[in-house]
Amino acid sequence: MLSEDELALLEAIKQTGSLSRAAAKLGKAPSTVSHAARQLETRFDALLFDRRRYRLQLTPAGQLLAHEAARLSTDVRRLTQRVKQVAGGWEDRLTIVTDEVLGFAALVPVIRAFDALQSGVSLRITHEVLGGTWDALREGRADLVIGATNEPPLIPRLRWLELGVVEWVFAISPRHLLAKASQPLERDAIAAHRGIVVADSSRRPDARSYGVLGGQAALAVPSMRAKLQAQREGLGVGWLPKSIAAPFVKSGELVEMRTADPREPNTLYIGWRGDHEGRALDWWVEQIKQPRLASRLVRGLSIDT
């Protein structure tokens, strides 16, 4: 590992092309700089400076040393910052998993507020669907889950809070055959048509789809965005979060239908492990506890564009 002075020497020679000019740049005597250059060559047992030309240059070996030493020095500085960061109670990285129904745009103001703390914590934000969101917490792939649906499962030292409630509407393409049926729609009438569902990303054997009636054919799609598109295209029928369906119902791309058996609202949750400690996690939990933010996250469910 090179010292800061040795790194500065290599950079000064590279920039000025002269021992005397390098010495002036560093504020040192030329003899001191010349001696330091020879010591470097002795230390690495290699010719680092090409003295044969009018302009002093680094040899290929010298260029390699300067480049790699600078990179290692940067890495050490970054590592030092990270060690101090963790010693100060901040995590090295915080992994947040949201349910796919929660659009990323809703988290942007929170991320900006977190960035303003200048904590140095790296954020990783991904999403899962239905039971997969809780799985991420159970399996250690998430430090915090936001917008998880279904009741909190049995996870060691699980801590959770209710985020809010999602209301659903039965919305289909006006071109779909069911759009002409009399309302309220009975279960048998709905079951006669293919249902569009978002596939649960959980790998557990009890993973299941929601919003499909017994015996109803189904098309499972990977995301709420895909479900919305499939229903707009008339590929099937199904329930959509009211806030997501609303603009398309307003534009006439979807028709909201009354049903004999309305779908009950779903509660969304945030969850984290009580055995995880860190200032970043604490900050995020405290932010989402705020009723105004929690309400905005739920009301702001949308398809990101």
Image (tube, rainbow, N blue to C red):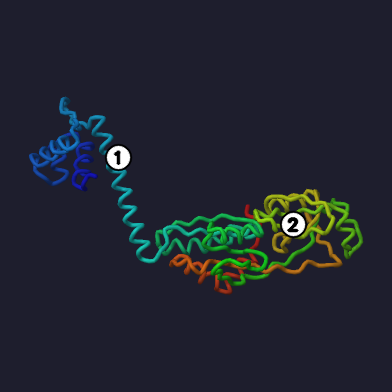
Which element type, helix, strand or loop, lies under badge 1?
Answer: helix
Would residue 242 be found to the left or right of residue 6 on screen?
Answer: right
Quick one: quadrant of the N terminus?
top left
* Residue at image point 31% right, 48% down: 74
Q: Quadrant of residue 26?
A: top left
Where's residue 175, x and y in %? 85, 51
What's the distance in space between the residues labelled 1 and 2, CA to CA? 56 Å
Q: Is residue 181 left or right of residue 15?
A: right
Q: Earlier in the sequence, mark 1 or mark 2?
A: 1
The image quarter containing residue 171 is bottom right
> Residue 28: percent from the left, percent from the top?
11, 45
Amino acid under label 2?
Phe
Q: Is residue 302 above or below residue 21?
A: below
Q: Mark on residue 68?
A: 1
Q: Position of residue 181 (x, y in %)?
A: 91, 58
In the image, is 277 to the left or to the right of 77?
right
Label 2 sits on residue: 248
- Bin the neighbour count of mark 2 within 10 Å (Cα to Cα): few under 14, some 14-19, many 20 and up: some
